[in-house]
Image: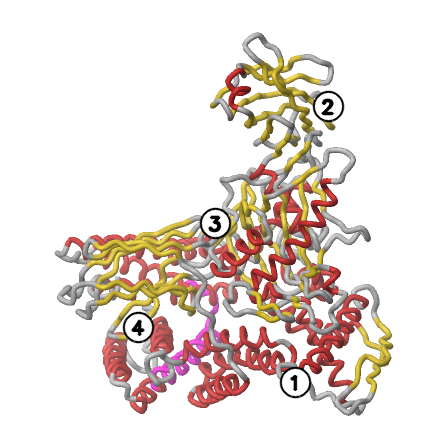
Amino acid sequence: MTQYKRVVGIDLGTTNSALALLSTDGSEAVLWEDRFKRKTYPSVVGINHNSEFVSGWDAWNRRAIAPYPVSSIKRKMGATQTTTLGEHKLLPEEFSAEILKGLVAGARQQFESRPEKPITFDAAVITVPAYFDAPQIEATKRAGELAGLEVKSLIQEPTAAAMYYAWKHGISDANFLVYDLGGGTFDVSVIRSLHGEYQVLGIDGDNFLGGDDFDKRLAEHFRKTLVEMGYSLDLNISESSDDAVRFFLLTKLAQEVKEALSTTEVHYVARRDLFEDHDGNSVSLELEYSREEFENLVADLVDQSIACAHRALEKSQERAAVTLADIDFVLLVGGSTHVPLVKEKVKEAFCSGQSKAGVPMQDEPDTCVALGAAVYAATLGGLQIVEQDATLHVKSNTYTHESTIDIFAEILLQPELGRAVKTAALINQAGDVVALVRANGEDDEIEVAFEEIQLADEGEHRFRLELCDADGDELIGFELEVYRGDPDRYRPSGSALSNLSVLAKDIYLEVVRDHRPERQLLMERGTSLPSGGEFRFYTADRSGALLLRLYQNRYPIRTIHLSIPPETEPGTPVELKLNVDETMTIVAEGEVLGQRFWAQIEAPQARELKDWSAAEAILGEVEIIAKELWGNEARYFRNATDPLVAGIREAARTDLEKLQALLLRLEDVLDTYRNRESALTPAWERYEMLLNGVKRIVFRGDGKRQLGLSTDEWRQRLEDGEKAARAAYDGANQAAWTQHFNQIQATWESLSQDEFRFASHSDPDSHVENLKATLRDAIDRLRSDIHSFTISANEETAQIQRKELELIRLELTEKVEGPLNRLENADVSAIKAKPELDRLFETYHFVRKRLERLPTLGLVTR
């Protein structure tokens, strides 16, 4: 019996998973569904009475039975801590493998038992959040392998969704904003499709933002309501398993209410005997709850997702000049986009005349990621037709919207049979030979290519592909179907040329600067994958050891340790080459003193989980730093920390995994205001930021005496102040450092207020034109300084400096001069132009600072 084989697409979700494949003729994407026609599979793992693993709906139905099933394990992917389920202790990828095993078993049963054209599979394309980092992606790949699958590729979920929308709706050239709000994670991507190829231009997201957070927010609201009704429900989910079950049951109720409010304005909640409170009283809840109340409760969570989307657009603008105005389609993906508030906020922020999209598109939001993965899987894996003695592997698409189709195939067969094959014939249903070609290849692997096969009508076309001997007699044959679709609806499916993955987080190397460690950016977030880079660093001391410590964002992912001769001179070159493939596997290799090294970057060691006392210490540090700040600095700090602090206090009651993630994010913010190697606060970078702001105002060249000082007087004052501040900082003199920091902040705030008054009470249009002219003159002066820069006599240093000069020229052109040209040619009001000019001045001063640091470039760190 003929058997068909496809590569499937799998959405391994936080809350639910799904699996799909393309039909044999490529005309239809087919989802797995269970006997109850449910098309999603709960991402839950439990154990039965025999301590055997169960997953999906079987595990979900045991959610209130001890030992309680493991859910939302995707949030822990990449971690090295195990999670306990009964007598089992498994890593996150091992739990995910159990989910995949159950899903795959059900799908195989469905697809292999089809009465016509049964399809089997043993390989998959699995999707991952766009914001997953290397350890999380590697863990996902391993989960697939543990489930017995060959993982052909891992693609990002928003990209898969865009591919399905484009494939289903016949969209060829377009820019997509994909808003993917699932149960446990949020992703947003800006994706460009050009002639059926895809490129990711910008990403952002939050691995701890999704519908589960809506549910827990509402569950906590219900808990407080019950407390007000007199129930004893001061829950401690981290210490009490009974409390964890109580809150879980409230969460399930909240989920039901949330889903009901997606279709009605008011929902009547009537639930008796939910559980017993701490005093043994049976808890019942009876009330009316409105959609408006729910939307007010979760509005800040939706706003967080909107902010992520704006950051992704900023990245796409920076990388490819694709702005919101260039977006053709806004796609709503994920089950949580059923919430009306989400639809309204997305429409308000990204449609309604701000982009080319009139309204957001929403089509199969719960399963479109799996369907898109199936489309791409068919492109990667083609179609295999398995007969008893041979396998036909059709590598080209079996679907076209044109009147002709090209068929490229590979046939695997027994060597003695292969040696006899000389030609291949393609025969239509009428028995006519429509193409006859020479068979090429080895004895057991034959390749054939039929080009421009005519398809007269739309619909299915059946052919027989026959392999023939020297006399033209058939040796073996295969039945093959192709499909001609609507000629006006092109169905792009991507190819190997598509850039489907981008680097989710910056990669850094820890280096030494001014005897202090800092992180040097090696590869920027948003870089298309696969990618690589070659770098040269220099030894900094005679310790006899070389440490290359790599980070993703602020987290160490690998340290390479080499022993070198202690007499090695500081400044000895260290060559480093970094490669990142499309699955975000990172490989570092290089050489120092003829000694080569190689390392594949693996998941970092587990970070110690912080208990509440450690969390309180971090929150206490927030208050300490806040007291040392004032004015705009204090406002900036509060704007960054207040949402995190509120989220931490909420997560302590409702979500312990999210608590850990928010604590790490808060530490990221605190790192900007403190130094890892010093007790001094604020960090030096804050001083530099304020100093650049002062320079932007006083050196703009408009002839105005700012605060009564001339330009030369300002130059001398700022140089003296920076020198004294640096001495205080390097000398770890907190009192002196605080004094110098307060001085520069006071100067900046005074100038900013003066600048505001100037802009407010003068002609804004003239002021903006003056700023444009000033920036144009500054660009010309900087170009002259770049041209006259004296290159080092040391050839190695000179090479680095020449490369850096080229990057400086490029940055000046692309990030300052180019945007200024566009601003001058655009019809933009002075009010809108002023903030953009401020940003360009800031970038200009950053580029000039880069040139000023060039003479020391090759000494220690670069």
Q: Are marks 2 and 4 in contact (CB under 8 Å)?
A: no
Q: Earlier in the sequence, mark 3 or mark 1?
A: 1
Q: Secondary structure at mark 2?
A: loop
Q: Nearer the viewer, residue 783 or 465?
A: 465
Where 796 sits versus 452, above or below?
below
| Mark number displayed over residue 582 | 3
Where 271 sits versus 569, above or below?
below
Q: Are marks 3 and 1 in contact (CB under 8 Å)?
A: no
For label 1, the residue is: 236
Q: Secondary structure at mark 3?
A: loop
Cα separation between marks 3 and 2: 39 Å
Q: Position of residue 852 (x, y in %)?
A: 25, 65
Cα separation between marks 2 and 4: 68 Å
Tag 2: amino acid = Asp
Which range of residues does the magenta coloring cover?
743-770
Looking at the image, residue 799 sits to the left or right of residue 128; the answer is left
Q: Position of residue 713 (x, y in %)?
A: 25, 79
For label 2, the residue is: 457
Q: Earlier in the sequence, mark 4 or mark 1?
A: 1
Looking at the image, residue 742 sits to the left or right of residue 541; the answer is right
Cα separation between marks 2 and 1: 67 Å
Question: Visible in this render: residue 515?
Answer: yes
Judged by depth in the image, the label closer to the viewer, 4 or 3, is 3
Quadrant of the rendering where the C terminus is positioned: bottom left
Cα separation between marks 4 and 3: 30 Å
Query: Number of labelled discs?
Result: 4
Tag 4: amino acid = Pro
Q: Earlier in the sequence, mark 2 or mark 1?
A: 1
